[in-house]
Image: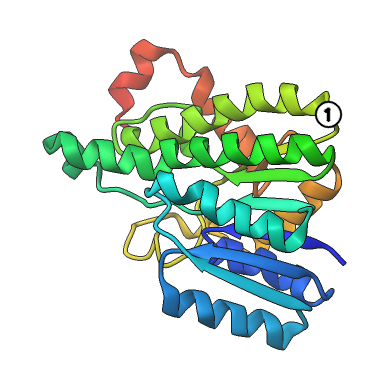
């Protein structure tokens, strides 16, 4: 049976992906900050058919505890087929502009904590010589925009890190996947004025993630049309782009 580690397991997209494999009797090691939501997620997966579910409560910004949690996971499972990193925040750009401490904390939440996890996971996956490390970044990382450039720069850092890590891990039989969602209907995006035509559910994203892992894709835009949207945005010349205020 498949053994899956999910970090940020209470996020809507992580829960949707986990439900796919719970129905196929997978085993899970779930990590999240909110103990109550984490336990509810574990209970839901057991009801759906998960063979076993382990949980660990952790604020992912507490980087010093990463090794402890990951050691417990690998001690329990011996080997992990899929590790999905799905935690993060959606910061208020104005708050980040006005307070350097807020900016640094948000960059840590969305960038540095993920890079720390990827480094630790890579060393463990390198020893087992198989499996997939998947991380949810964002289309926002493809180009810095005034509305969310703190968030976008953190995701861009993770994407660039993944590119180098992917080449390294390919040599030892490990797959690294960068997942780039567009607008997703989650609690994190509620209250934002998003175009409904581009808004998808976490279940849609989960299916893209599962397919991309199975096909060993390097990166995946979810849904597919975001590849063309972001390609167009990246092609806009800087003198024009800075005047558009996107």
Q: Nearer the viewer, residue 202 or 52?
A: 52
Q: Quadrant of the N terminus?
A: bottom right
Specify whether residue 215 is in view: yes
Residue lying farthest to the bottom in this orientation: 47
Q: Residue at x 61, y 52 (%)?
A: 71
Residue on which disc 1 sits: 172
Residue 244 image offset from top left, x and y in percent: 32, 27
Q: Quadrant of the C terminus?
A: top left
Residue 115 image offset from top left, x and y in percent: 51, 35
Q: Residue at x 75, y 28 (%)?
A: 169
On the rendered structure, is 188 left or right of 245? right
Residue 135 image offset from top left, x and y in percent: 61, 44
- Disc 1 on helix, strand or loop? loop
On the rendered structure, is 191 left or right of 166? left
Q: Residue at x 60, y 68 (%)?
A: 15
Residue lying farthest to the left in this orientation: 98
């Amino acid at each position: 049976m498949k053994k899956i580690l999910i970090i940020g397991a209470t996020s809507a997209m992580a829960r949707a992906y986990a439900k796919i494999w719970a129905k196929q009797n997978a085993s899970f090691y779930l990590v999240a900050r909110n103990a109550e939501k984490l336990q509810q997620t574990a209970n839901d997966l057991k009801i759906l058919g998960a063979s076993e579910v382990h949980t660990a409560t952790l604020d992912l910004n507490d980087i010093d505890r990463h090794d402890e949690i990951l050691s417990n996971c690998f001690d329990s499972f011996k080997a992990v087929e899929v590790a999905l990193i799905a935690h993060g925040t959606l910061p208020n750009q104005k708050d980040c502009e006005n307070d350097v401490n807020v900016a640094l904390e948000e960059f840590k939440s969305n960038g540095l904590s993920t890079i720390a996890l990827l480094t630790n996971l890579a060393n463990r996956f390198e020893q087992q010589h198989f499996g997939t490390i998947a991380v949810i970044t964002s289309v926002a990382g493809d180009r810095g925009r005034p509305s969310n450039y703190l968030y976008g720069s953190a995701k861009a850092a993770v994407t660039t890190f993944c590119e180098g890590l992917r080449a390294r891990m390919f040599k030892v039989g490990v797959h690294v996947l960068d997942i780039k969602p567009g607008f997703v209907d989650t609690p994190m995006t509620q209250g934002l004025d998003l175009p409904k035509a581009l808004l998808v559910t976490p279940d849609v994203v989960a299916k893209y993630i599962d397919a991309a892992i199975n096909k060993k894709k390097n990166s995946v835009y979810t849904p597919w049309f975001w590849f063309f949207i972001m390609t167009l945005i990246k092609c806009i010349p800087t003198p024009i782009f800075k005047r558009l205020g996107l």
